[in-house]
Image (cartoon, helix red, strand yellow):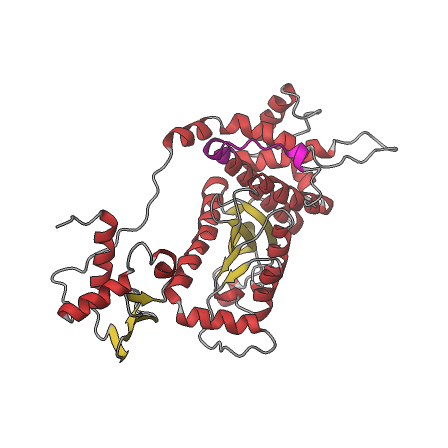
């Protein structure tokens, strides 16, 4: 008897898990059955076509000519032995894991600081410098942005970060070493906010050849200042202010492609359009995944208009009524009837949470600035610093060498 391969054994285990559930298989008529999905949500049609059993699940559609799917195996087992009782613990399906490429990871981590300075210098040089015709000579815009992002990356105080600017000056990465208090004044400038937004996109574009699927989500970052409270009068505990940060992130490298920063209680769904459309300026979009907070007909249509497909779960009170959007009804039926296939795409959303976790662990979840403008600019500096560290890892993992000066000429990037 031929010994089963590792994958055949795994598929047989999954078939037994399906068959161990009560009423897992229902006979519709002779030669036609419904087989419950392994998750227990939804079912698939398994039909005899005169030669073999055929299933309408994604696995069979893709690989049915090579091997039967777990639903076909479950039905065959059912016809042979009936209901299966698994003694002891249910067979567990080992999650797919990916081994860490330690050689490249170690190289990236050990060279990060040196490469960070170099890439940051190239990145800020893409910002056009306006000529000064009057007044006292000011610090160059490129130098201002370099020092702000470097300070946030280092997580040092203003005074201690001053030595980093001196080292950058010696390497000709900036043209002037500013006073240590200059960075706090620069972060207060509202005019640098759109420039920092542009640098976020530009810092992500080198991975356009790798990322085509994206996740959208939001998270909060605490501010160092406290909001209004009535502690003395009512005994309420005083609370910190915080900002809500909405991002679109690539699901393969976790690069942040765009960011929107709002007040703490802003809704998620209205930010979806900005994030996705600005991501499309530098990337081709195949899939967008997001949680229920972004579930709307408009958001599905937006992704379709950009040439992609949205995988967003529906709220409990949602219906398939199209209300002028056939795409909504189609997505609703797919969500209801093909939960297992939907989950295969939707699980990518966890990458957005991984991105936030990485940013907070590496650069802190508290913003040190006190004023709203400076807080937003500081948050953007965190995102840019994070993106550069992702690029450094991708440089060793995928052999990519970012060239921001060349990318700056691409008309697709605004």
For the record, the magenta segment spans 392-407
Q: Residue, x 55% and y 42% (percent of image)?
A: 209
Q: Which residue is drawn at 60% across and 40% down?
A: 203
Residue at the spot 60% in from the left edge and 68% down from the top edge: 298
Asked if the magenta segment contains residue 331, the reply would be no
Snapshot quadrant of residue 88? bottom left
| Residue 136 appearing in the image | yes
Does residue 410 lie above or below 346 as drawn? above
Please provide percent x and percent y for residue 347: 41, 56
Residue 155 is at least partly visible in this image: no
Q: Which residue lies furthest to the front in this view?
A: 50
In the image: residue 98, left or right of residue 221: left
**Residue found at the very far top of the displayed protein:** 170
Identify whether 381 is placed above or below 329: above
Question: In this rendering, is residue 166 above or below 287?
Answer: above
Position of residue 243 measured from the top left corner of the image (x, y, whole percent): 57, 54
């Amino acid at each position: 008897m031929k010994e089963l391969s590792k994958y055949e054994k795994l598929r047989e285990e999954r078939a037994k898990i399906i068959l161990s559930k009560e009423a897992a298989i229902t006979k519709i008529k002779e030669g036609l059955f419904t087989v419950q999905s392994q998750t227990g949500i939804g079912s698939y049609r398994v039909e005899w076509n005169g030669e073999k059993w055929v299933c309408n699940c994604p696995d069979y559609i893709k690989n049915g000519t090579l091997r039967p799917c777990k639903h076909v195996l479950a039905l065959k087992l059912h016809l042979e032995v009936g209901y299966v009782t698994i003694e002891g613990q249910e067979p567990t399906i080992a999650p797919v894991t990916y081994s860490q490429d330690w050689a490249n990871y170690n190289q990236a981590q050990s060279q990060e600081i040196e490469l960070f300075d170099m890439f940051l210098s190239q990145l800020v040089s893409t910002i056009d410098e306006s000529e000064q015709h009057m007044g006292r000579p000011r610090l160059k815009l490129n130098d201002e942005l370099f020092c702000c992002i470097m300070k946030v990356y280092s997580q040092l105080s203003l005074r201690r970060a001053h030595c980093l600017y001196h080292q950058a000056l010696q390497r000709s990465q900036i043209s002037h070493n500013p006073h240590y208090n200059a960075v706090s004044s620069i972060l207060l400038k509202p005019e640098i906010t759109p420039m920092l937004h542009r640098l976020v996109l530009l810092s992500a574009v080198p991975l356009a050849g790798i990322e085509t699927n994206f996740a959208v989500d939001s998270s909060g970052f605490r501010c160092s200042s406290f909001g209004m409270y009535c502690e003395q009068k009512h005994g309420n505990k005083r609370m910190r202010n915080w900002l809500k940060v909405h991002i679109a992130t690539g699901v393969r490298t976790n690069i942040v492609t765009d960011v929107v920063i709002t007040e703490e209680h802003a809704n998620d769904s209205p930010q979806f359009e900005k994030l996705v459309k600005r991501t499309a300026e530098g990337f081709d979009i195949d899939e967008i995944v997001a949680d229920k907070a972004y579930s709307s007909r408009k958001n599905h249509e937006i992704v379709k208009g950009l040439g992609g497909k949205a995988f967003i779960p529906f709220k409990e009170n949602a219906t398939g009524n199209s209300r002028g959007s056939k795409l909504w009804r189609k997505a609703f039926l797919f969500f209801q009837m093909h939960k297992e296939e939907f989950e295969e795409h939707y699980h990518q959303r966890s990458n957005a949470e991984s991105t936030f976790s990485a940013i907070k662990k590496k650069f802190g979840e508290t913003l040190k600035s006190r004023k709203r403008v400076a807080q937003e600019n500081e948050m953007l500096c965190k995102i840019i610093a994070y993106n550069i560290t992702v690029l450094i890892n991708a440089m060793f993992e995928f052999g990519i060498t970012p060239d921001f000066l060349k990318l700056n000429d691409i008309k697709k990037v605004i």
